[in-house]
Image: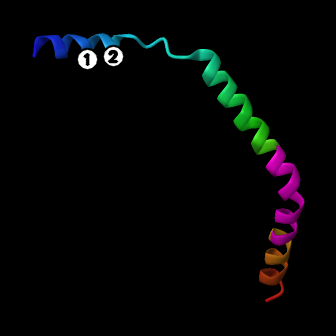
């Protein structure tokens, strides 16, 4: 049981992680958000404006 406990603790102590991987994931996510925002932004703004106009017209 102590061998398993030692392996578990040593795994928790190693917090280096894969920094280049996380940077790549973050940059790719930001690029996707910008792409989707650029494509869908005008359509969403139109839908929002229509909803506001309908509520204001009451």
Depicted 7 relative to depicted 31: above or below: above
Depicted 15 relative to depicted 34: above or below: above
Q: Which residue is mark 2?
A: 12
Residue 12 location (% of width, % of height): 33, 16
| Image point (25%, 13%), residue name | 7
Depicted 45 relative to depicted 3: above or below: below
Q: Secondary structure at mark 1?
A: helix
Q: Main secondary structure of the magenta part?
A: helix
The magenta span reads 35-47
Contact flag, marks 1 and 2 (Cβ < 8 Å): yes
Q: Which label lies toward us, 1 or 2?
A: 1
Question: Is residue 12 within the magenta segment?
Answer: no
Cα separation, mark 1 vs mark 2, equals 6 Å
Give the farthest residue toward the left. Answer: 1
* Image quadrant where residue 15 sits: top left
Observer-nearest residue: 49 or 43? Answer: 43
Disc 2 crowd rating (10 Å Cα; few below 14, some 14-19, many 20+) is: few
């Amino acid at each position: 049981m102590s061998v398993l406990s030692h392996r578990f603790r040593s795994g928790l102590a190693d917090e280096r992680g894969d920094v280049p991987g996380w940077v790549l994931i973050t940059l790719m996510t930001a690029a996707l958000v910008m792409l989707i925002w650029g494509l869908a932004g005008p359509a969403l703004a139109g839908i929002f404006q229509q909803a506001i106009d309908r509520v204001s017209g009451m």
